[in-house]
């Protein structure tokens, strides 16, 4: 037996099957790892992209949450999985991502309830420092809990919409125009994500210090939405090139023809009646 085949685990049907599953593992792992990092980073810091002075002496600040930085990668991963492995696997990864969200929140909750070495006040509460801040873990925990509803609702809606629209465009174009389903699905789904996460995060108090309550709030929220979406839109347009190149190379490497094997409108295989199989 060739050494290469002998190295396969019994669960791997062939070298080609093993190759396909390992590429899927890399894509799914990158998606889930990025998602976990996003949940921890979240709104722990806002990055100032641009500040424009206004006539009234104030300023327009264009900023994005640090958790937004890796987020476009998740849409690229689900587009690769959708194109190469089909809609069912892409949706499965999205649902596993939801479970990962819950797991991260569970660990943060347990880690905060167990006794530690922080100094406690007479009332049993953790003593804040001179800047009225809790220890770093509890600051991160508070911000993560404050944004968890926003991130989970926005994430689930955006990713499921992304997978649905990807396959809808694929069906309508007969598998042609790869750029259209890549950009058409991502651009719309990221708009849903951006609007949801900003509005929900603000409603639960997660934008304190970013939104100035002494000025009209609607304009500030609109600016945050526009800034976050512009950032994601730019990366959605940029990732068209690596997506094209990646699909072309992976299709040959994995010996997969996305147009033939994973069309959204293909008919289900129907077995003949039991009587005809006797």
Image (cartoon, rainbow, N blue to C red):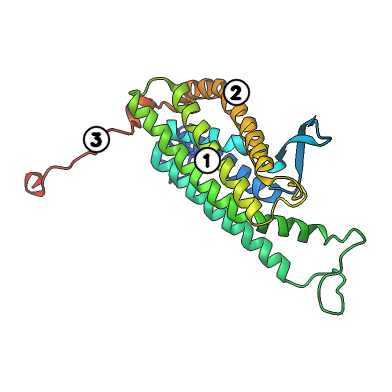
Query: Does the rendering let one see residue 65?
Result: yes
Which callout, 2 or 1, points at the residue further toward the start of the chain?
Answer: 1
Q: Place residue 133 in its image quadrant.
A: bottom right
Left-right relation of 73 to 17: right
Which numbered disc covers residue 267? Answer: 3
Count of numbered badges drawn on the protein: 3
| Residue 23 vertical placement versus 238 (above, below) | below
Find residue 112 and report its horizontal and vertical position in percent: 72, 66
The residue sitting at 62% across, 26% down in the picture is: 234
Q: Place residue 66 in its image quadrant.
A: top right
Nearer to us in this view, 217 or 50? 217
Is disc 1 placed on a helix, strand or loop?
Answer: helix
The residue that disc 2 covers is: 238
The residue that disc 1 covers is: 192
The residue lying furthest to the right in this view is 130
Query: Does the rendering let one see residue 1?
Result: no
Is disc 2 placed on a helix, strand or loop?
Answer: helix
């Amino acid at each position: 037996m060739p050494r290469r085949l002998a190295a396969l685990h019994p669960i791997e049907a062939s070298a080609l099957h093993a190759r396909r599953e390992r590429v899927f593992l890399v894509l799914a792992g990158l998606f889930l790892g990025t998602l976990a990092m996003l949940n921890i980073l979240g709104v722990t810091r806002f990055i100032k992209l641009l500040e424009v002075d206004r006539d009234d002496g104030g300023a327009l600040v264009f900023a994005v949450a640090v958790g937004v930085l890796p987020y476009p990668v998740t849409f690229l991963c689900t587009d690769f999985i959708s194109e190469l492995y089909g809609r069912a696997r892409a949706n499965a990864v999205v649902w596993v991502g939801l479970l990962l969200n819950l797991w991260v929140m569970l660990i943060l909750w347990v880690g905060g309830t167990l006794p530690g070495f922080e100094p406690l006040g007479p009332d049993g509460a953790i003593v804040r420092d001179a800047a009225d801040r809790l220890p770093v873990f509890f600051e991160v925990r508070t911000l993560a809990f404050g944004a968890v509803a926003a991130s989970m609702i926005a994430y689930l809606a955006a990713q499921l919409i992304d997978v649905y629209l990807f396959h809808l465009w694929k069906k309508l174009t007969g598998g042609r125009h790869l750029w259209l389903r890549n950009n058409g699905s991502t651009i719309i789904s990221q708009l849903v994500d951006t609007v949801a996460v900003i509005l929900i995060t603000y409603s639960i108090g997660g934008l304190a210090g970013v939104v100035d309550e002494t000025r009209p709030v609607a304009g500030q929220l609109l600016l945050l939405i526009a800034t976050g979406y512009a950032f994601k839109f730019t990366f959605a347009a940029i990732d068209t090139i690596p997506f094209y190149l990646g699909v072309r190379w992976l299709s040959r490497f994995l010996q997969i023809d996305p147009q033939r094997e994973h069309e959204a409108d293909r008919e289900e295989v129907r077995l003949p009646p039991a009587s005809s199989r006797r």
